[in-house]
Each structure stands twice: as structure tokens, then as C-alpha cells.
Amino acid sequence: MMFLFCSDGVPMKGERRIASLWLPFWPIERLYRDLVQRHPKIPERPRALARPGAGGLRITVCDRRAQAEGVEHGQLVPDAMALCPLLELHPADSEGDRKALARLARWCGHYTPWTAADPIGRGGEPDGILLDITGCAHLFGGEEELLSILHRRFSELGLTVRCAIASTPGAAWAVARYSRNTLSIVPLGGEADALRELPVAALRLDRAVVDGLVRLGLKRAGDLYGKPRAPITARFGAEVARRLDEALGFEPEPISPNLPHVPYRASLSFPEGLTQLLHIEEAVRRIADDLCEVLQREQQGARQLELLLFRVDGDVTQLRAGTGRPSHEAAHLARLFREKLAQAGDDFDAGFGIEAITLACLAVEPLSPMQDGFDGNETRLHDLERFLDRLSNRIGQDRVLRLEPRASHIPERAVADVPSLRGMTPAMRSWPTHRDVHRASMLGGSLPRPLRLLPLPEPVDVVAEVPEGPPRIFRWRRIAHKVTRTEGPERIAPEWWRGDRQHTRDYYRVEDSEGCRFWLYRDGLYYRNKEAPRWFLHGVFE
Amino acid sequence: MSPFFAELAIATNFSFLRGASHAEELVMAAEALELSAIGIADRNTLAGVVRVHAAAKEAGIRLLVGARLVLQDGFEVIAYPQDREAYGRLTKLLTLGNRRAPKGECHLGMSDVLAYGERHCFIAMPPAIPGKDFAGNLALLAEAFPHSVWIGLAPLYRSDDKRRHAVLARLSRETSVPLVATNDVFYHMPNRKPLHDVLTCIREHCTLKEAGFRLSANAERHVKSGEEMARLLADWPEALDATQEIVNRCHFSLDELRYEYPADSFSENETPQELLERLTWEGAREHFPGGISSKLEKTIAHELAIIEEKAYAPYFLTVHDIVREARRLNILCQGRGSAANSVVCFCLGITSVNPVEVDLLFERFVSKDRDEPPDIDVDFEHERREEVIQYIYEKYGRHRAGIAATVITYRSRSAIRDVGKVFGLSEDVVTALSRSTWGWSSAGISVEDAEEIGLDPENPQLRMALKLASELIGFPRHLSQHVGGFVITKGPLEEVMPIQNAAMEDRTFVEWDKDDLDTLGILKIDVLALGMLTCIRRAFDLLDRHYGERMTLANVPPGDEKVYDMLCNADAVGVFQVESRAQMSMLPRLKPRCFYDLVVEVAIVRPGPIQGDMVHPYLRRRSGQEKVDYPKKELEAVLKKTYGVPLFQEQAMKIAIVAAGFTPGESDRLRRAMATFRKSGTIGMYREKFVGGMIENGYEPDFAERCFKQIEGFADYGFPESHAAAFARLAYISAWLKCHYPDVFCAAILNSQPMGFYAPAQLVRDAREHGVEIRPVDVNHSDWDCTLEETGMGKCAVRLGIRQVKGVQEATAVAIERSRAGGFDSVRHFWLRTGLYPRIIERLADADAFRSIGLDRREALWAVRGLGGYASGQNGKMPAALPLFAALEEGGLQREEEMALPAMPPGEHVVLDYATLRLSLKAHPISFLRNRFAAGGVIPNARLKDVEAGRRVSLAGLVLVRQRPGTASGVIFATLEDETGIANIIIWPKLYEKRRRIVLTSRLLFVRGRVQREGIVIHVVADDLEDWTQELGLLSSEDFGEAVIARADGVKYPGHDPRDGNHSKEEQKRLRAARFVPRSRDFH
């Protein structure tokens, strides 16, 4: 039987071959990878993910240790904890799982360009990848070899994987998930046999439909072969017949309609992962040469380019660049990416190395001899902002700072320094204006503090009335000040939950005979603390 | 001489998540600081005032009772009623605010305050920045109530205190409203600040780190002495003096609310006492047709005299009226608790135990010394209690009858949960911590507990969290409605206490709980629900209809030998109170032969006697193995009835009096101290006094310790003798029904589910073992309820009702009954006639209810699915066809292709029966596996009785019940069922720890263990356990025979498939099977 299949608008003749990868522990193994990255020595503990569901938090997925203790999908957390008191819980993050899976699928792009995260998973969430390997397998030494490469690579990434190759996505999906073997290959035309003994759930049907079929005794896919379609369709909808046809190859099924059409691409892989930026740049240059050779031959110039850096650890870095006019100059194109890579600078993370690089033209135009004019479309920055940016760039980002208010009663914790480059944060907008301060001091409300505090409060000698009298005379930096006016005390208790054993402070605003104003505090209360309180000066009003 | 100062703005922890001290703590602090008086004002509520009232009375501190009214626009004013009428207006005002707001909120505006504010003292509490709004509201209030408004002046230790005070003083001058000194108190001591911060965070749903300015800057809002306040407000001495004026003006006290009983139910020409006496003697003649003995006459006269002296007659008449109405409505009811001590209650028909017969003490119920109203609890049928409640509302009006509140307080679990969140502990740590304690514990979580679950005990955050959590325990969290506590007043209820909305629509409850009502002596009646009464009433109805026997609670023949024979054989499935596993093993040892034996039986298997280690001595003495003697002669009177062993609550109390030298009042207080707050301090004091007193009087220290332990046990679930007697009565009646009419009893108890200890499957099985024919659910025969069908042999068969089918509503059953007429002859016919959605019919098909049409469940399901409404995404929700086409449709003109469906194996039928009906009449699931099990040496449960004690056996069965009684130090009792019977398994804690998962999750459990015997009671003490749940999966596979062979080879036996992957085949089977077999019933 011959069928025509469409892949991304590029018609292909002949049999299609699809590899389906199933990651049965995907979310939890992803968590492990994150944990190990953050704390290389994490203790061995049963772990599980949970999310709020009916009746409280419910387990969404758990690791093998937890499974061995009886934890299972859909269980209420308290039940799971009763079975497995050491269970460590993390919040489920299906959005993150989905995104990471999409990245992983893209990473598989160096086996075949046609890859996609499988939208249908065994739970409600995607947990697999589909690869259209039609015509690719021989590059890796045949299908069997490709499967074992995939299996090895995923194991190295810390991911459990089961995979199957078949002529239809449906059959590959079913066999990957329901066969006894970790790796399976369904020979051409062998789909019907391969599926016969698998449960009907292997047909990617709705759970309710599966349930209904099972209750009628139609438990295996094979039970549906040769059965009249009309009565089944009347009872379960057209889905049953469609899924069966898809799996058996009677009906075509595109795997991912959203892949970009890539007219030109070149790639290179490396036996040892590249880690040095220099080597990567060199490699990009070589790939650009290859690509430009083809472009030149076809009289095309690149307008949009995509550089994919496939990391050993299963991640992909994706960089895009555009050109002002179509170009097939390898040096120019390579430079575009060199700048991008350099921009990433220290942030660029090659992980354990780059094992393959692909450079693809996403858009090409016939080469035109004309050069476009350069129009100055610069955005206008506020003068001060621009000044701050320049200053920051010149003397260092962490040397130009802004003050940001923090919600703490403790004066030295009420302000934080942040790099000016981050711009105005919402918190900064809550700084009181002059008018606010004025209004507050007329009506009541907390009074302004010194604009700048001393880096550390400085001890002072004070003459004051016990227990709560304001300072009368104080000596600071060897100069005695006679106090004429005072206001206070403002009493501030320590932030007890931080565990530091600080005292309660009583702050006073004072004015000396010279008219200078100071902010002093008594550290500790008489009668409540054992040792006698001491006095400090914390700031000067300017 | 300290200056006069009264702190008039105190919030208790009934200002939920704001106040951080208990009422008692605040009063103690005020007493220590020698305050002249205090005023309690919680946020829009009076819920906490009774506790403060009681504490202040004891401490001798003058108390002002009021509320802090927080208006919708943010204005806060404290209101103190000056007299009883003003208090009534305040409660009305709060009721108004509560009733128009959702539960837990109170919406008030200034116009409401103006309307109800007459003769109050108001203290306006200024906000942080007293602006125009404050001044405006203040002016309104001052104008409406001249010379009755003050401005609260508080030293807050903010930077602007002086300026703020100046602003307020100016406002005071401008409006001529004087200032009054207060510290706006939230806690009794500065070291409560951490807890106050935690409460703030719980309220604001944030962590301590995020809370920022939402926390207060300092710890100054505690109770302060007069000197301190005078120093802080030295510039405003008149503000301190003002407190005295307010205190002098408000002379209302909660004591003025002393109860006046409603007088509705009485006639005009008789006083309540006369009426009560007449009704009592009438009742006596009716209940004692044989004549009233002189002893009885004396008892009645004695009781009536005390009732007259205490003027409780209206109360008795009120309860009598409610009970009489229930009788009229044919609702079964019975008084429980201490009311059963009263012959008057018996004569009035409130209780059904004759106290003379069991020699109960009236003084336990009402005493001359105790100045509190009697407490009568009445049980009603749980299904029909609502009618009784409606009657009370109707008779007394909603404005006079209300439901009492229950104060929901923080317990270990909820406290650590909330505090843990505030500390930012991760979800799993919090969950693990809260799991490490039993659900209702109030003991807090220790650092050792935390260490046990793998947390670092040195972590300071964790330590702080645990400490604060234990401080939080006992704090009220919110109010909820009590299950059945009714309060009835003479005048309008809302003038006595505020009323709130309940979570249930149209339900309201008062703000005080039962203890508060007790404290103030306000009448309350517990209208409780009891499932067994429903069951008995249904049984009586069936008896009348099918056997022509008219029975009542009173005329069940007493002393029936056959009934006691049955109980002695531990044949008690379904019998009230004595059906639990522990009771069933006690029955053959105690061998009840008369009613009083049953009373003992009910009371003995309780934490009190078990913790006090009184059970075995009692049994030994009763069977004559041990001589009956009394620790001292003086105790003989107390303990004579129970062979010298104290079993009942009142016996333990009596020992306190007779042997430990307590006064009756002290003994009663001891009981209450145990029941309500278990603060180690108070208990320790009583313990010393009790044990020490007994030793001093010449008792063995060991006996004294045991007696005290027993009182501790009673605190949890103690049974006074009268209560046990009331329950024993129902136990006897249910046993009588089960013994003589097992068919009636089976139908009645199935129709009263959920109740009791056993699932329908066991009840049905038990009935079948007693020769009752049970017929399956069928669309052509079943009603909603289980019914009796006459067999023509003098007995009836039980037809299971549609109520047994999971997921089907009563309305569905009614629709079927209504349209049944001549019966249904096809699924399509059924659909068109009943008009039910196909998805509902599907549930009936799944339950195999179309057999009378000739379809098994698979064929019926195929037919239902063919009705349409599935393919087009309507999910089986298509209504039946239009009537016009109905006739056409009914002929079944459509033909479709034949479809050969595989036949369902019998094992799968059974499994699906369990899945849809929770029971199967076809076979027991284990019977299909018997051959396999036999090959593995597993014996049927029925064979256990032939096995010698001490021998090792292997058993396997479905887990019916798992039980971990608090009194059994971690031992787990499990009950296994197979097709031949049940087996009782004992699992020691050591094995449990090793096989935790298996114990907790197995549906089919394999046990290897040793047989233990005691009389006819057989236990198997487990040595090892295996989870065989996956075996059940075999029942639904077609290749069942094949699997049996494979298993017999011992190839795959028994373990799991080690194969890689998420769900191995075995695992899938396990999951599938687990879905079908109902979960066991687990008890703690």
C-alpha cells in the first residue's frame, strides 16, 4: 500500500517512519535535574509533585522510591504522607514541564529536523516526543542503532525513556507506551499485528471512551478489528474509528503543523562537546562557509538566520539574527552571531559542551546588488536615564545605585541599594514626595527620618532621664551637644523571627543648641532588659 | 495609692486573628496590675464576653461588656451599654449587622449606630492619622448622644505621638468630646508580640518576611498599670479620670441575663409546677400499670420537690412539649445522658429507661448544690430531626429560638499548618508536621516529633514555629453552628445575644456556645440525631406492614432469652453500640444475660475503663475467677453493682468524694476540668489531691492511680451510667429485631445508611447467613428503598432498592416507580417512559438492573449507548424523543448491524457488582481465587475455628475494617472477609512500621500469623503481610483460566513485575481492581 504524506508542505514519497519517545517520569525527572544542578549532593528521598485538586493537594507524579512505598497518581497528599512519611513534595509545574519538553523536542532536532513534543500524553499532560525519521535513520546506522543512541542519550540526561519506531505516529505511540519492551521497532505493515494485543487505551482515546469500550468487553485494540463501524460510532463517536485508522495507517496524520519551513540549513557535530566560546565561533564560521556555498550557487541571500547550539545536557540555545539586506557572505553572517555570542558574554552557558550546531536560513531573498540606506531610527531616551546608562557602562553597573524602599520597621532594613540600570521599580514610586511629608507632619503620621543613615550606628554618651527620657546632653565624635528640643520616643521592636537577638530601640529626634538635628536611639529598655541600655547615633538631618 | 484607671479597649482572641490573648489571661494581667476595672470590646462581636465575665467574676474585677463597632467606612467606636435595655439594643445592632453580611462578617453603618446607640458610652478610636472622616463621624455621634462620647487617647510609641495627641486634643476642644486614656490592648503581655505578628500574617495571608508594615512596630499594646498610663499620658491627666466616669455610668452586668423560662407551653389555670406534677403522675400511672410502689412514689415526690425548689418546672415542660410533638409526628426519640437519672423524665416520656430499675441517682442530674440548669439531651431519628427543629422554630419563633454556636479552635494540626505557612515552611514540611500528630490532638508538636520525620531539630525557624503553634492551640478560629444545641428565651433572643448567619442558607446561630449558655444559666436543649432511631422506626413500619405487628420503643418484649443467646454468640452485626470489633470480642466474655449486663457491656468498651485497666478485673470477678472485695468498706455502696470495679463516670466521681475527700462540687469541677481544658497545671493539681487523698485514707497507691487514670479516660469519652442505660435500651431493641425479624432488620438498616460500623455488603451477607433471601436491584421490581417481598412461607425476601446503586438520585427512583405501571420490556421502552437521561440509565445498566428484561449488564449497556446522545458530544444527556415520535420509536423500527460482544466472565460480574452496588449477590470475589489460594496453603476463614491456638496459619481476604484505637498503643485491628466468613487480625506496631504501605492500602490482604483464642473469640496475630490486591485484577480477565495455571506453576508467584516503566501490567491490574473493590472503613 502506498500513501502520500505531507510534511510541512514538502511532499514526500514512500513510507514514513516515526519514532515515538515516551518519558514516563518526565516531570519528576526534570525536577531531579534541576535539584541536582542546584545542590549537587541531594539526599536520596522519595519525592513527588502535587497540585491542588478535588479535596486538597493531590499527587500528580512521583518517583520510583515513592511508588515503591505506595504513592500513586491522584492520591491525596495526606494519604501519601501516611504511607511514606519521608516524602518530599514539590509543586507541580505543568507549564514549565510543557516548555521544557518543547525544548527537549527541539534538541532532538539534530537527529531529524522534524520533531515535536507529543501533544497527547498518558495523563492529561504531554509526556513524549515524536520524531519523523523518514529517510534519516541510515545516517545513524539504521533504525535499531538510532533507537539505542536515543535511549543512551536520554539515559545520560537522567531521563527514563521508552521508544518505538513504526510507520504511523499512532502505532509508534501505542507501542512505546504499552509494549513490554523498552525499545521496539514495528516493521513496515506490521502495525495491525503489533497493536492487536495492546489495550484499547493504546489507541489514544478519551478516557471515558476507553472506559465504555472496556465495559463492553472490547478491551484490546484487536477486539475492534473487523467490527462493524456504524454501531460503534453511534455509541462512542467517530473518534474510535479515526484513531484506529490513523494507527494502522489508513488515514494520514501530520505530526507537527507548526514547524518552520527551512529552505537551507547546514550543520556540524562534534565528537567532543565544545565548551570554549572561541571554538564555537570557529565552528560557526565553518558552517557559515558551507551554507554560503549553497546560497551562492543558488543566487540567494539570507535575510533571517537561526543558529541552534545543541548542548550535551539536552538543552538547545537558539539565536536569531537578521540582515539588513540579503547576504551570502560567510564572514558577515558569522560575525552577526559572533556579536550575539559575545553579548551573552559571561552569561553564555555551554553546559557540558556543545555537541552539534545547526545554522539555518529562515528567510532568503534573491540577491540584489543594491545596498539599503541606513536610517537612524534611534529611540529617544530620557536624558537622565541615558546619562545613568552611560555612567553605569563606564564605571560598572554595581557602582551606580538607586535606593529602593523596603517594608521593614527597622531603619537600616527599610532601604535597599539596587543597580541604577534596573530602572525605576514600582516600589520606588512609593517614596513620599515633599508634599506627602509636609501633610503628614501637620496631621500626624510617621515623621521623616534622616535622608542618609550612618553606615553603622555610632555609640554616643548620653545624659538622659530613666527610663524613657529624651537625651539632654550627648557626646558624639568627642564633641558634646546640648539638646534643646526633642521628639520621641519612637519605639521599634526587633524582627524577632530573624532569630537575631537585638533589643527594642527608642528613637529620638533631637536638635542641639547650634540648631543641628540628629537621630539617636537607646538600644534596649530599662526594666525589661537585663543589661543597661546603650545609646547610639544613627543619622543626621540635613 | 495608684490612680484610678480602667483599661476600656481590650480585645480578646475572639477578635479573630487580631487579639492574641485568652480572656482568662487578660483578666489575670488586669488583676496583677491592680486595674480598677476593665472593658472588653471585641470586633463586632460579643462571642468572647461570657468567658471574660466568668473569669472577672472569679477574680473580683469590675467588668464592662461591650463591642468595638467597626463600621463599613472604617470608623471604629467602642460601645458600652449602660443598662439592660441598652445591652439589648447593642445585641440587636450586632444581629442586624451580622444578618445582612455573609457569614463571619458584620456590616454596620453610622446610621445604625445612631439608631441603636441610646444609653451607651461610646469611645471613638481614632485611626493612625485622624482626618476629616473621623472628625465628621465623631461630630455626628456627639451630636446624637451628648455627654456619652469620648475620644480614645492611646500612647502608641510612634514617632508622632505628641503631634497626634495634640491633634486629638484640638479635636476634643472643638467638638467638646472629652479624651479618655486607653492602651488599645491586643495582648496581655509584651511577649505575646510574636504570636500577634503570626496572627496578623495569617489574617493577611502572607509570611513574616513579606508582612512588612502590616506588622506593628513594637510590642506596646499590652495591659498597662495605672501608674504607667499616668506617666505616659502625663500631659492629659483628665483622660485617666474619664475612665472612672465611664465605669460609673455603665452598670450593666451579664448576670442580669439570668434565664427566665418560656411560658408558652403551659395552661392558664395551673402553675407550671402544678402542671408538671399532674403530667408526671399521669405518666407514672401509664408507665407502671401494675401500680406505683411506695418507693417509687417517694422517689417521684423527692424529684418534684427539688424541681419545685429550683423552679425548673418550665424547663421540663418545654422538653416534654417537644418530645410530645415528635411522638405526634411519629418520630422516634429518646433522652440520653444524665436526664435518664430522673423518674420524672421517664414518666414524661422523655427517656425510656426506668431509673428505678437500674437504680440511678437523680442528684447526678439535678442537685441542690449546683446552681445550674439541668441538661436534657434528646436523640431523634436522623432523617427527621429537621422536622423537630422546624417545630421549635414554629412554636417559639425564630426570634426566640436559636442554635448555639460551637467555637472552632486551633488544634495541633491546624495550628502548625497556619503557623508553618507564616514562617514560609514548605508545603511538604508543613504537611509532614501536621501528619505527625493525630487529628484531634491538642498536645502540640514537640521538637522530637519533628526530628522523627526527618527535620533538623536545631533549625531555629522550625523551633520558633513549633513554639508559636503550641501557643496558638486553643485560640478560637471561627464560630460555627452547634449540631443540635437549641437555646430558647422568653423575650426576643436578639436582645439577649447577637445572632449570626450560618454557612447553610437560612440558618442562623447565636454567638455563644453551650458552656457560655451554661455559665449564664440560659435554657438549652440538645436536639440530636441518631441513625439507629431511624433504622428502628423503619423496622417498626415494615413490621406493621408485612407482619401486622405494631411496636413502639416501649413495648418490645424485655428479657428475651433468644436475644441474649444471640448476643452471647457475638452475633451482633448491625446491633446498636455492640457491633464494633472490640464489642464483639467482649460479648462472649461478658455473656450478657439481662438488661443491666447490656448497660455494662456498652460502658465497658470505652477509653475510661480500658485506660483505668478495669476491664479484666471486672470480667474475672463476674465469672467468679476472682473474689469480689472492696478496697474499703465505704466503697461497697458505690461499687456493689459492678463487683467492686468502677466502670461508670459517676462511680469514679463518687470515689473522689468518698475515698479522696473531695466535696461533690470539687468532684464535678474535676470532671469538667478534664473535659474542657486540659492544661497540665490544673490537672496536676487535681491529680495530687486525688491520689494523695486516697493514699491518706488508706488506699493502695496502685488502685488510686488507676482510678485517676480512669477519670482521665472518661474526659474523652466517658459514659455515665444513665447514658449507657439509654444506649443499652436501643441496643436491646435492635438486637431483638435482628433476632426475630432478620429480614425486616436488614431492609431497615440498609435504608438508614450510612450509619454504624458495617458496609451494606456485610449487612447483606449477615442477613443471608441468617436465612434471609436477598433479591437483586431490578428496574421492574426495585423502589428507592429496599423493600420486603412476600415469599408465601411466612417470611419475606429483601428486594434491594435503587438507593444501593452508586450515583443514582432518589428522584430517578421516583421517576421509575411512577412510570413502571405494567413493567418495562426493553431499554428503549424504559428510556421513553421514564424520560431519564441515557447516562443515568447507564448507571442502572452497570448495576445489572435489567435482568428481568433479559439483558445482562453488558447487553444492557450496549442498548443504552445505542439510545443516542453519546456520539455527538452530549455525553449521554439527551432527553427522550418527542412524544409524537415516541410511538414510532417504541416499535423499534430502526435496525442496526448485529454486534457480537464477548461474554462477561462471572468474576468480572462480581467485581462490577462491587463497583456499582458495593456488594454482590452472585458470589464473593474470593471464591474465584480459592483454588489459587489453596495451592498457596491459604485456608478459608471458616476453617479458623478448627485450628488450635498457637498454630500458624495463612489467610487472605478483603479488608473490611482497619482500626487503630487510641487506647491500644498503636496496635492495628483489621478485619478480613472471604467467601466463608471473617477473620480478625491483630497487627503489632513493629510490623505496621515495616509494612506500612501494605497495611494502609491493600484491598486484598494476605496474612501469615498465629492463632489466638479466648473462648469463641479468635484472633490471628500477624507475623507477616502481603498485598495481594493485584489478584483481584484477574477476575476481570478473560484468560483467567490460563492465569490460574501459570500461578500454580509458581512461576510468577507472588511478587511484582520488576520491569521498567511506569505502570507494569501487574500494577495496572492492581489499580483496576483497587477501583472496583470499595475501600475499607477506617476508624481511629
Image (spheres, rainbow, N blue to C red):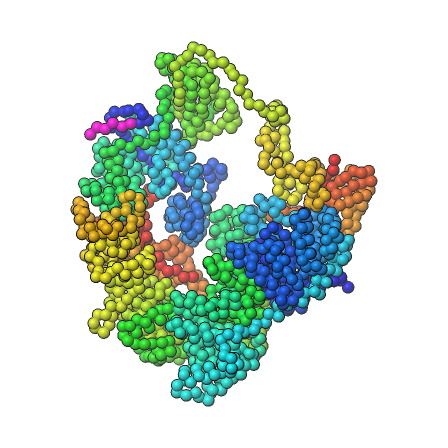
Residue B868 rendering spot, x and y as whole percentages: 25, 47
Looking at this view, name the residue that lies furthest to the top.
A369
Looking at this view, name the residue that lies furthest to the bottom.
B294
Judge whether B471 appears above or below A400 on screen. Answer: below
Residue visible at 52% across and 47% down? Answer: B425
Judge whether B829 appears above or below B716 on screen. Answer: above
Q: Main secondary structure of the magenta part?
A: loop
Q: Is residue B695 visible?
A: no
Quadrant containing the C terminus of chain B in the rendered view = bottom left
Residue B908 rendering spot, x and y as whole percentages: 24, 54
Q: Is residue A403 visible?
A: yes
Residue visible at 20% across and 59% down? Answer: B852
Residue visible at 37% across and 21% down? Answer: A265
Q: Which residues are magenta?
A: A1-6
Residue A294 rendering spot, x and y as whole percentages: 36, 15
Quadrant containing the N terminus of chain B in the rendered view = bottom right
Nearest the eye: A208 or B481:
B481
Q: Left or right of A256: which side holds A429?
A: right
Residue B847 rendering spot, x and y as whole percentages: 27, 56
Q: Left or right of B601: which side holds B246?
A: right
Q: Left or right of B478: which side holds A103?
A: left
Nearest the eye: B146 or A280:
B146
Judge whether B79 appears above or below B579 on screen. Answer: above
Residue A533 counted in the magenta span? no
Count of numbered circles on the image: 0
Residue visible at 48% across and 55% down? Answer: B436
